[in-house]
């Protein structure tokens, strides 16, 4: 070995170590030549320490030090001394190492970008050179936060008597929800495994097997379009418990969140978390994952406008729909007609056909729809939404979900555009959303689908509604939300095979299809399945929130782009014809 191993790391030394002889290893982060006096900032995972080569003490060593370039891998030995010009921005800023020897272990090519936190980088460049991007202190801090997250998770669930069990990555395809990633079998040509979207069925079977408390930090896969807070492969903390109610699962979940936020951010979460029904969340905030850090609540004005001459609103009311209002406080002057047109286009992305509005300025209404309302109706609307001078009122009119979803999206957009989100970015507001619908109607498939998944138990008074009034049935389901992001979701599961059959029937699945896809689960439920339930937390998204970044790719060591590409290693890629032959596959030529 032609280099010396470290005796200390680059974030460890303090003024108490003065006159200590040490050896450091790391990367040359910055090299400065100040008239022969050479300074090198040496960086490793733990931090940065300044090295200094003095020509007056060792001219040969100082001359060699001039040849060190940024990102060279270096070993260095010397004595710790107090710095004449301290750098209070770093923990080691009171000391430096006077070199008595050093060596370049490995020369580095000129990197395509500077390895520092404040460099402006295109994300594709970051992902192509991910091995360099991950050297940046900001990125290392995020992944170290993720590592701390793992350790807290293991400890907490072990302390609460959970068993960590691994479930298979190669499983049966059960396409009822997102699209599966398929894996062809070489041995059984023409047959396929699927990568798990969730270990849902396996963890239920583990409850049937009698383990009672299960947890796993697990990779899951969904072949779906990606967004800034979503990846095709993601990690979740998967939890399942036997002989429990919703309150029991929530108690474990809340204790876990309290521990995470305290140990990582030193933030105390107040327990129990506030509870809010799905319907209340939609009616007040336009979202089943409401951001409660700011007000701007929606107001239902259906009864006020149902007899107005504005047919767009009155027709919606007559057909059982909803007319609601978002009061954007103080925004009347800032939102010109052009900006309102931009809001209208934004609303259309969420299903709106248009956007009706009113400005309340100096006691008068400025609006293209004002002529359709009596003064009394306008006054009641203003009173209902607590309107004040300078407010901008935005209206939604549609079916329940469609109306509130549009206004909820506008609520968030205005909060971002006006700086409200920036003002509350360092606060955390949690809620648990409950009483979800068991089903939602899929217009494209013209059938009811499970809002969460087909294994969610109906509430006791909704059991008969599965077959007779599916639109009215409620689920024993719950989501945990913080700052407008869903970080965990779960339910009490169906543990009775006959109830599970009713659920499958309500989803339009034929008996032979049920037997093929889920026969093994029904078989397990026949042999004494206990009441059970659980929750799954999105690890990547939680780390994103805890680390204060708004991009989930920052929290994953080797993520994919928004189009599912890995720019560093070039996957997905073509494979050799021989590999396809072994699998009994051939590719169709594009026409």
Image (cartoon, helix red, strand yellow):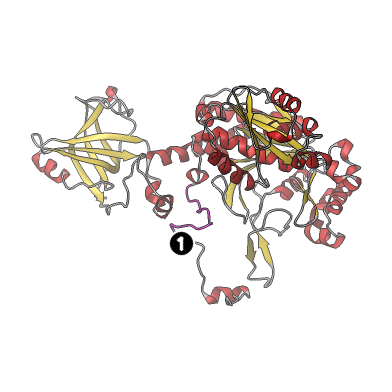
Q: Is residue 214 left or right of residue 141?
A: right
Q: Is residue 426 visible?
A: yes
| Above/below status of 105 relative to 286 | below
Q: Label 1, on which residue?
A: 570
Residue 108 lies, in percent from the top left, at 27, 52
Instruction: Kindly identify the residue that appears in the image at 72 percent across and 49 percent down.
Output: 202
Q: Is residue 308 left or right of residue 43?
A: right
Residue 345 lies, in percent from the top left, at 59, 46
Instruction: Kindly identify the residue that appears in the image at 15 percent across and 45 percent down.
Output: 66
| Above/below status of 407 relative to 198 | above
Q: Is residue 212 visible?
A: no
Q: Which residues are magenta?
A: 557-568
Q: Quadrant of the C terminus?
A: bottom right
Magenta span includes 211:
no
- Check disc 1: other Cα within 10 Å, few if <14, some if 14-19, many if 20+: few
Residue 307 lies, in percent from the top left, at 81, 34
Q: Would you identify the image quadrant in which residue 477 lies?
A: top right
Nearer to us in this view, 329 or 506: 329
Nearer to us in this view, 578 or 114: 114
Label 1 secondary element = loop
Residue 212 lies, in percent from the top left, at 75, 39
The majority secondary structure of the magenta stretch comes to loop
Instruction: Kindly identify the residue that appears in the image at 83 percent across and 53 percent down.
Output: 504
Magenta span includes 559:
yes
Nearer to us in this view, 305 or 190: 305
Nearer to us in this view, 447 or 452: 447
The count of marks equals: 1
Residue that extends furthest to the front in the rendered view of this protein? 371
């Amino acid at each position: 070995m032609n280099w010396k191993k470290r005796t200390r790391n680059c974030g460890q030394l303090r003024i108490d170590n003065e006159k200590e002889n040490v050896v450091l290893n790391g990367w040359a982060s910055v090299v400065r030549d100040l008239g022969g006096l050479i300074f090198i900032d040496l960086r490793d995972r733990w931090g940065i320490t300044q090295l200094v080569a003095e020509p007056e003490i060792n001219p040969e060593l100082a001359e060699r030090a001039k040849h060190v370039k940024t990102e060279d891998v270096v070993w260095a030995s010397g004595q710790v001394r107090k710095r004449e010009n301290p750098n209070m921005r770093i923990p080691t800023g009171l000391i430096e190492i006077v070199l008595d020897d050093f060596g370049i272990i490995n020369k580095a090519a000129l990197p395509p970008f500077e390895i520092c936190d404040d460099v402006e980088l295109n994300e594709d460049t970051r992902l192509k050179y991910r091995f360099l991007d991950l050297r940046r202190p900001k990125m290392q801090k995020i992944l170290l936060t993720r590592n701390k997250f793992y350790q807290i998770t293991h400890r907490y669930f072990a302390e609460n008597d959970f068993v960590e069990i691994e479930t298979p990555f190669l499983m049966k395809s059960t396409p009822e929800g997102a699209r599966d990633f398929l894996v062809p079998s070489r041995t059984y040509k023409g047959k396929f495994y699927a990568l798990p979207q969730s270990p849902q069925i396996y963890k239920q079977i583990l409850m049937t097997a009698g383990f009672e408390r299960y947890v796993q930090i697990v990779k899951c896969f969904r072949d779906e379009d990606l967004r800034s807070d979503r990846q095709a492969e993601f990690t979740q903390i998967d939890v399942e418990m036997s002989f429990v109610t919703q309150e029991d699962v929530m108690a474990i979940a809340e204790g876990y969140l309290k521990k995470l936020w305290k140990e990582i951010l030193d933030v105390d979460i107040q327990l129990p978390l506030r509870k809010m029904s799905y319907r209340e969340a939609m009616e007040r905030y336009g979202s089943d994952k409401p951001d409660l850090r700011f007000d701007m609540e929606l107001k239902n004005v259906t009864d006020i406008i149902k007899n107005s001459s504005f047919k767009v609103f009155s027709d919606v009311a007559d057909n059982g729909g909803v007319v609601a209002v978002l009061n954007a406080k103080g925004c009347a002057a800032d939102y010109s007609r052009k900006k309102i047109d931009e809001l209208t286009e934004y609303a259309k992305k969420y299903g709106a056909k248009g956007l009706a509005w009113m400005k309340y300025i100096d006691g008068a209404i400025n609006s293209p729809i004002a002529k359709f309302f009596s003064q009394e109706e306008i006054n009641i609307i203003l009173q209902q939404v607590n309107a004040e001078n300078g407010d901008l009122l935005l209206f939604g009119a549609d079916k329940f979900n469609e109306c509130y979803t549009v206004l909820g999206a506008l609520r968030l957009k205005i909060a971002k555009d006006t700086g409200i989100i920036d003002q509350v970015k360092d606060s955390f507001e949690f809620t648990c959303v409950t009483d979800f619908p068991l089903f939602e109607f899929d217009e494209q498939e013209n059938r009811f689908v499970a809002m969460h998944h087909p294994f969610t138990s109906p509430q006791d008074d909704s059991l008969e509604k599965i077959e007779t009034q599916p639109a009215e049935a409620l689920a024993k389901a719950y989501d945990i939300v913080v700052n407008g992001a869903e970080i965990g979701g779960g339910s009490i599961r169906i543990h009775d095979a006959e109830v599970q059959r009713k659920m499958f029937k309500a989803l339009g699945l034929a008996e032979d299809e049920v037997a093929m896809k889920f026969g093994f689960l029904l078989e397990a439920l026949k042999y004494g399945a206990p009441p059970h339930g659980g929750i799954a937390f999105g690890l990547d998204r939680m780390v994103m929130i805890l680390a204060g970044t708004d991009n989930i790719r920052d929290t994953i060591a080797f993520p994919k782009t928004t189009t599912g590409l890995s720019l560093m290693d070039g996957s997905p890629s073509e494979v050799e014809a021989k590999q396809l032959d072994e699998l009994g596959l051939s590719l169709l030529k594009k026409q």
